[in-house]
Image: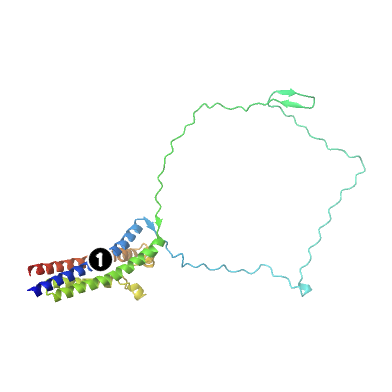
Amino acid sequence: MEQMQYNGSQHSQAMISVCAGKNIFGLLVILAILTQLATFVLLKTKQITIDPVDRAAATTMPAATTAPATMPAETGNPENAPAAPPEPAAAPQPAANDGPTTQPQSETFDVEPAGPVHVVSPYVIELAATEPATEPADKAATTQPSQKTRQPRQPMNCTKILQWVLPTTKFIGFVASILLAVSVLLGVNVAIIGQRQGVDKLVSAFFWSLLLVAMLTPWQQIMPGSFASGALYNLGDLRKYYFTGKETFDQVMLYGRLAVYPGAALLVTLIVLAKFCCGRGRSVKTNKAE
């Protein structure tokens, strides 16, 4: 009897440890998938933007050098030398005038003074300062209150942020899914060794976890050029599907790859956690009954 109680306590402690690891790895998978789904939603609602091409990878071609318009003349052959420009003609000299020189007469203009004139001397005339006439402001200046027009919010460019966030969540989700499957397998072994109920639920959770690993495996990097692809993506995959045409097939591929596929992986993760909790509950009830 004491041996059975000792085995039951060991089974409970082992199952508690397995459940703790399963919860941590399952939570990491859920956070990774939700981060990528939130990225897609923010892009479609124009809250953030990304560059259509990778600016760092874009290379600029050097400008082509053009041949000079004129070729230099060969100095060795005098026949090919360019002709010297003609000398400019001498400017005609004005004829000498022996007659008396006459000064040009200055033109005089009649200017009417704008104000009263004060004669200071026969040669100096002083004009009285006059103030410019100003028109009285008959009409008050009417100013309309400036209405503050609300400028539309410009979406933030998150290319550099997503360049690190998406690959990080992709790696975390893939590794966490493998560790989740290992944790569920350990739970199956503990339940089988302890001869507890709920093993069928635990085995079902393990197979669902294998499906989750297959969905989160980055097949596009493992087998490039094939149609296989994982549920998680990086910035290059996001550009590939997001900046596509407006045709129906392109839109189906866009939403199917970036929204439906990760959503299905999230649903599988929840199924794994639910089935494991159901099998563990039956195992705990069996332990208490004994």
Task: Locate the C terminus by quadrant.
Answer: bottom left
Front residue of this view, candidates 162 and 111: 162
The answer to whether residue 83 is left or right of residue 3 is right
Task: Tell me if residue 28 can be seen.
Answer: yes
Residue 93, image x and y in percent?
A: 86, 50
- 282 versus 131 height, above or below: below
Observer-nearest of 257 and 154: 154
Q: Quadrant of residue 173?
A: bottom left
> Residue 273 appears at what percent x and percent y?
20, 66
Q: Secondary structure at mark 1?
A: helix
Q: Residue furthest front?
A: 2
Q: Quadrant of the N terminus?
A: bottom left
> What residue lies at 17% left-to-right and 69% top-to-bottom?
13
Q: Is residue 237 above or below residue 107?
A: below
Name the outermost residue toward the right: 98
| Left/right of residue 6 with respect to residue 30 in the rendered view | left
Q: How is the image coloured?
A: rainbow
Q: Residues within 10 Å of mark 1 (few under 14, many from 20)?
A: few
Q: Quadrant of residue 168?
A: bottom left
The residue under label 1 is 24
The answer to whether residue 97 is above or below residue 130 is below
Figure quadrant of residue 146: top left
Q: In the rendered image, is residue 243 in sight?
A: no
Query: In this orientation, which residue lies closer to the viewer: 56 or 197?
Result: 197
Which amino acid type corresponds to the residue marked 1 in the rendered image?
A: Ile
Q: Residue at x 73, y 26 (%)?
A: 126
Residue 242 appears at what percent x and percent y?
A: 37, 63
Toward the viewer: 93 or 230? 230
User: Does residue 174 sit above or below 161 in this rendering?
Assistant: below
Q: Residue 143: where, in percent of width, then height? A: 46, 34
